[in-house]
Amino acid sequence: GVFIAMEESMRPGSAGKKAILECLRLLGVLRYLRRRNRHAITILGFHGVMDPTHGAAWRPLREHLRLTTFRRYLVTLQRHYEFISLNRAAAILAGKEPPIRNAMVVTFDDGYKNNFTQALPVLQELNIPATFYVVTDMSGSDDLYWFDELDYLIQKTSEVDGDLKYRGRSIRLPKGDRKGLDRIYAELRNELKTGCSTEEEFVGELHGIAEGLRRQVGHSLGDVCDSDDWSAVATWDDLRHASESPLVDIGSHTESHKRLAHASVASRRPELVNSKRIIENEVGKPCPNFAYPSGSFDDDVARQTEDAGYTTAVTTVFGLNSAGDDLFKLKRVL
């Protein structure tokens, strides 16, 4: 149980990551874990990576991983693991290539611009391949993710002593209290995700909340996104340029970041098929890899993903992957 807890603590999104990794290295526990799972494949999952000293229009409550921490992780892990591409990992898991010891894969969800301006140079320096999952509607427009827009509006509404109105409730947003705002924001995100039975209801609730906050603030994240490295999404030009590197694989994260298990069966196929086709047309390379938005999938979604022509699909389920595992239910360390 101790070793499982320590593995859990290595998640890039958890607190105390730096200290835990250093302790693991010093105590030799990482070496133990590698021996115990030497033929399993670890798939890491990241979102944004940012240098906090870099100029930005605002600072999210849902902070991205610090660039210096990201580099430290990779340097430490590279001493103990062999980083391989997701495509090679898939071949190993399918028994098409022989297993290798202590294999690790790097993935990024959502296609943030900072993945390519800040994280990719570190990956290139260390010669580490990575798969970047992008939402095609986002890369082809000026749209921003709802979770970033909501984050921004909650903070700005608190600065004007505004309230968050939701389902008949009015919640005072504490000015200057980032911890309090973060708690409210996290609770709202969870309630939005779990309290809506359909994706259409979810989107409707979200737009209603955001519109109420925009009226109080008088502007939105879209008004500052040109100077915002936290929430800006990579353009097709960014993705084409990055794809010139043999280390870069562009995967699909659907057309619109729709939670597929909550969506109608008929609406899933376009999200899967169109995004794959668009990516292949835009970057000129095959797109065999997929990531379920918000980790939303079930057996039917996995089957539809395979039918759409993908080779793999990653989840948000925590764990390692072994030969013979379902390639459309790959586990990750997030």
Image: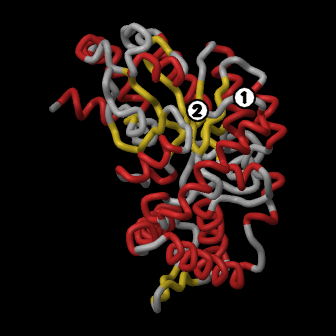
In-image side of 11 versus 242 (left or right): left
**Distance Cα–Cα, label 2 vs label 1:** 9 Å
Q: Residue furthest front?
A: 307
* Identity, as a three-letter code, of the amino acid under mark 2: Pro
In-image side of 27 versus 81 (left or right): left
Out of 275 and 319, give the one closest to the viewer: 275
Residue positioned 63% across, 13% down in the render: 127
Describe the element under mark 1 as helix, strand or loop: loop
Describe the element under mark 2 as helix, strand or loop: loop
Out of 72 and 282, give the one closest to the viewer: 282
In-image side of 178 versus 246 (left or right): left
Residue 65 seen in render: no
> Where's the C terminus, which quadrant?
top left
The residue that label 1 is drawn on is 285
Q: Residue furthest left?
A: 1
Is mark 2 in CB contact (under 8 Å) with mark 1? no
Name which quarter of the figure residue 128 lies in: top right
| Residue 205 rendering spot, x and y as whole percentages | 54, 79
Label 2 Cα neighbours within 10 Å, binned few <14 / some 14-19 / many ≥20 = many
The residue that label 2 is drawn on is 288
Name which quarter of the figure residue 187 lies in: bottom left
Compared with residue 195, is residue 282 higher up or lower down, i.e. above or below?
Answer: above
| Residue 215 rendering spot, x and y as whole percentages | 71, 84
